[in-house]
Every structure is written in C-alpha cells, then in structure tokens.
Image: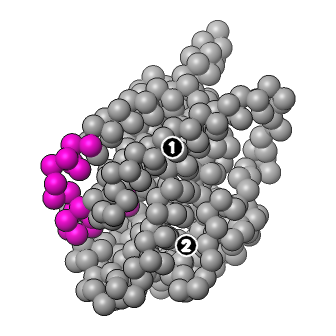
Amino acid sequence: MAASFPPSIFSSSPSSSKLTSISSFSRDSSLHFRSRRMRKVRATILRENEKVVVEETFQPKASPDHEPPPPTSVEKWVIKIEQSINILLTESVIKVLDTLYHDRDYPRFFVLETIARVPYFAFMSVLHMYESFGWWRKSEYLKVHFAESWNEMHHLLIMEELGGNAWWFDRFLAQHIAIFYYFMTVFMYALSPRMAYHLSECVESHAFETYDKFIKEKGDELKQLPPSKIAVKYYTEEDLYLFDEFQTARLPNTRRPIIKNMYDVFMNIRDDEAEHCKTMKACQTHGNLRSPHDAYNETVSSEDDDIGCILPDAECEGIVDCIKKSITNKS
C-alpha cells in the first residue's frame, strides 16, 4: 500500500541560492520549534532506560501575530467539563479492554490501532464539509491529519501481520467500536474541535502507555524476534515525507528509525504515539497547528519576489462559529 510522493524538499541542489535558502530555513525553523518550549517528550529512537512523559508535552503557542486571547472564566469552565467527559469516556473503554485483553497483547493492539486511527478520518470528513461550504480552508490540517491516519494504518498492518486480527470476535469488536467512535467524533468535532482533539490526545496517551508497559515487560523477548516486514518497509524503505508530516513538534528529517528486531518496531510505534499526543495537544489551541514542510515552503516563497496570489484561510471553530461568521461576512 505504498504511495509515491515528491522527493524530499531538503535534498541538496547545485544552486547556491537554494543552499542559502535551506540554511536560512534551518535556522528560522529551529527558532520556531524551540519557541514551543518542548519539555520531556522525545520521540526519537529512545534508549532503553530513558524516561518519556507524554503528559508533559510542549505548551501550545501560536505565532506572535496570532496570539490567542486568554480563556475567560466561562471558557475555563467549559474546557474542564469537556476534558472530564473525555477522560470518563477513555477510562470506560480502557476498562473494557483490560477485561477482555488482560493477557492477549497483539489482539489488544489490533483493537487499539483500529480505534486510534478513526478520529483522523472524522476530522478530515468535517474539514472537507467546511471547505465545500467555504467556511474553513485549512490545508495544513488536512495534510497533517492524513499523515497521522497513514501512520496509524501501518501500525494496524503490523498488528495484523502479528496475528492480532485472527479471531472474528476481535475484528467484530474493533470494527463496531470504530463505527460508533467515528460518528461520535464527527459530531464532537463539528461542535467543539478542542474537545475532539483532547479526546484523541487521551486515546493516543493510553496507546503510548500500553506500548511502553509492553516493551518494559517483554523487552528481552522482543529483542530475539525478527522485525515485522511491514515495519521495515514503512520505517526504512518508503518515502518518509508523510512520516515527517505528522510529527509537527519537530523538524523534518530529524527522526529516522533503525529497525533490527521487534523491540525496535514497538519502540518506534510507542514513539509515534508520543508524537501524535504532541500534535493533538497543539491542535487544541485554534490556529496553532503547523505543517513542518509548509514552514519551509513559506520561507522560500517569502524570499522570492513572485509569490503569486495567496487566498487567506477562513477562520472558525466548530459548525456554530462557521455558520455565524459565514452570515456575518455576507452581510
């Protein structure tokens, strides 16, 4: 299921002007990403005893010219309710999974990956609807969410290769939970993108903790097993443009996995989940999501005189806000 994408934008060129642009981009991008104040989450190839704390992600921060106003007391109250509901939903599903899969790791991972990729389909569905109505055009959101779904799809393929979907009940449960989760996320995202992103962060956080626990318990055994063929192809042989795209808290080309055994496979899956957490955290601040590759394109365009006609993106949060602003703009 591999796809072909444009060659890396960071490849060298004989043109000295382009080399200067790339060098300038690297300096500017480093400052941009440092300003996000990344803390303890590091999703590179982590060492065996290295600690990763998903909850302590970078603080979402928009660009200086797009600094969001601080939340009012009412907004803080609403956010607290949204997050409480999400935590309750997540913990309920976790209890079901703990009961059914307490000693069946690969089937549990299969169910978890089937569920974890659903929100990105839902986000893209709603964003396409907004774009069709002219309410909200956010190409960066669409591209990043597709890249996230592409990453989760390969996690799912790996679990299928390991036999996680062998029993019909596991497939039945995962598919029906996914259908319910999809429509629930579409409804939630249409009303409150912030709440939908937080729910997805909760799911990805649980996925990270699940894989982290599995690696600590089965690490020695995993090091003796040959790597998944799908994992080797995805992490080391395919075009890694989309692999870089979903990791919005880091520069492209800064994480290149090495896959020698199943321990490396699960380490990288775990680290992927940490990156998903950081992206979902950033999305909860409206307008904060930034494509790593688009940052480069904007830098190059700003240095050229002929930048063409760029239409501004429509800005709205949720369907209520979109309808209100659509009516306001027409009047």
Residue 206 visible in the displayed image: yes
Helix, strand or loop status at disc 2:
loop
Q: Residue at x 31, y 35 (%)?
A: 179
Sequence-wise first label, 2 or 1: 2
Numbered disc in front, either 2 or 1? 1
Q: Position of residue 161 (x, y in %)?
A: 20, 68
Q: Residue at x 22, y 77 (%)?
A: 229
Q: Which residue is mark 1?
A: 90
Left or right, residue 122 beside residue 237: right
Above or below residue 58? Residue 68 is: above
Q: Marks 1 and 2: in contact by CB < 8 Å?
A: no
Q: How is the image coloured?
A: one colour
Q: Residue at x 27, y 86 (%)?
A: 225
Closer to the camera in the image, 147 or 59: 59
Amino acid found under the numbered disc labelled 1? Thr
Q: Position of residue 186 (x, y in %)?
A: 43, 31
Above or below residue 13? Residue 142 is: above
For the stretch drawn in magenta, the main secondary structure is helix
Amino acid found under the numbered disc labelled 2? Ala
Q: Which mark is residue 58?
A: none
- Kindly indicate the quadrant of the structure image that contains residue 101: bottom left
Q: Which residue is mark 2?
A: 43
Q: Which residues are magenta?
A: 150-173
How far apart marks 2 and 1 lie (CA) works out to: 23 Å
- Kindly indicate the quadrant of the structure image that contains residue 113: bottom left
Closer to the camera in the image, 183 or 326: 183
Closer to the camera in the image, 300 or 229: 229
